Amino acid sequence: MVAFVKLFRAPYGVPNALERVGDGLWIADQISDRLALVDIAEPGKTAPGHGAYGVTFRRREIPTDGSNISGMACGEDALWVASNGPGALWRPLRPTDAAAGAGVILQVHPQSGQTRRRRPVPGGGGVHGIEYDHEEPGHLWITTLKQQTLTKVRITDWEVVHTIRLPYVRAHGVVRTQQGVWVVHTAERVIVHLDVVDGHELERIEVPATEPEPHGLCAWGNGDLAYCDATSGWIVHIHGI
């Protein structure tokens, strides 16, 4: 039976993407466009942190050229962030901000946050989620919101190699599995597992209204998932899938 466990809160007020790595959890902030690597622990109990605030120890933090960050992935010794337009709602514009209606994907250095490459979202439009394909390395999956599709691109030449239709609008976090790809649909509070060939639904997880709202998504190991809620700051573990 699927169960939801609130683990801890992000160090930022608006966590909009996350990615688990061997030494912790990367969390992206939609407001400041910074990335933080935090401990995975019970706040204030098994590691530094503040139990009353519900946050864990922030081990490292880096700035990025991202704007309105709405997706993150890890692969090829880099972090990838999805810029869903400019950050003008939260702060003054920067020269590196994505243009309105023209999201971009950035490959950034995991130590400095320096941009290594910058590519447009295929077909234009916004983006809320990305995933590095560890089953077929050298590819990214990108939520191409304008077309209501999930698009697979080859990183070397940024060529679109496959697309699948998404069942709902406002697709968010993405996780690739051996069998398919999980995609969050925030407005419907559902996470669907889709076949990577034709996009038919393999299974789904309904997120009850009593739980934090799903936004970003990452693999948690052993088939489990975790998501972040940009409205409350919670990081939630989903198990029993």
Image: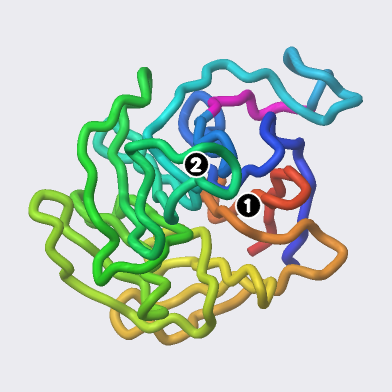
Question: Residue at image x 55%, y 54%?
Answer: 217
Q: Nearer the viewer, residue 23 or 127?
A: 127
Q: Is residue 172 left or right of residue 228?
A: left
When the figure is inspected, residue 10 is found, relative to residue 165, above or below; the finding is: above
Question: Residue at image x 73%, y 65%?
Answer: 2
Q: Nearer the viewer, residue 76 or 105?
A: 105
Three-letter amino acid code of the residue under disc 2: Glu
Question: Residue at image x 38%, y 83%?
Answer: 165
First in residue order: circle 2 vs circle 1: 2
Question: Residue at image x 74%, y 13%?
Answer: 48
Q: Is residue 188 left or right of residue 93?
A: right
- Where does label 1 land, which residue? 227
Q: Is residue 62 visible?
A: yes
**Residue 103 at x, y percent in the picture:** 36, 57
- Structural distance between the alpha carbons of marks 2 and 1: 9 Å
For the record, the magenta segment spans 36-42
Q: Is residue 179 visible?
A: no
When the figure is inspected, residue 25 is found, relative to residue 81, above or below; the finding is: above
Place residue 108 in its image quadrant: top left
Q: Residue placed farthest to the left in the image?
A: 157
- Where does label 2 land, which residue? 19
Three-letter amino acid code of the residue under disc 1: Tyr
Count residues near mark 1 (Cα–Cα under 10 Å), then give few for <14, some for 14-19, many for 20+.
many
Q: Is residue 39 left or right of residue 1?
A: left
Q: Residue placed farthest to the front in the image?
A: 92
**Residue 66 at x, y percent in the picture:** 41, 40
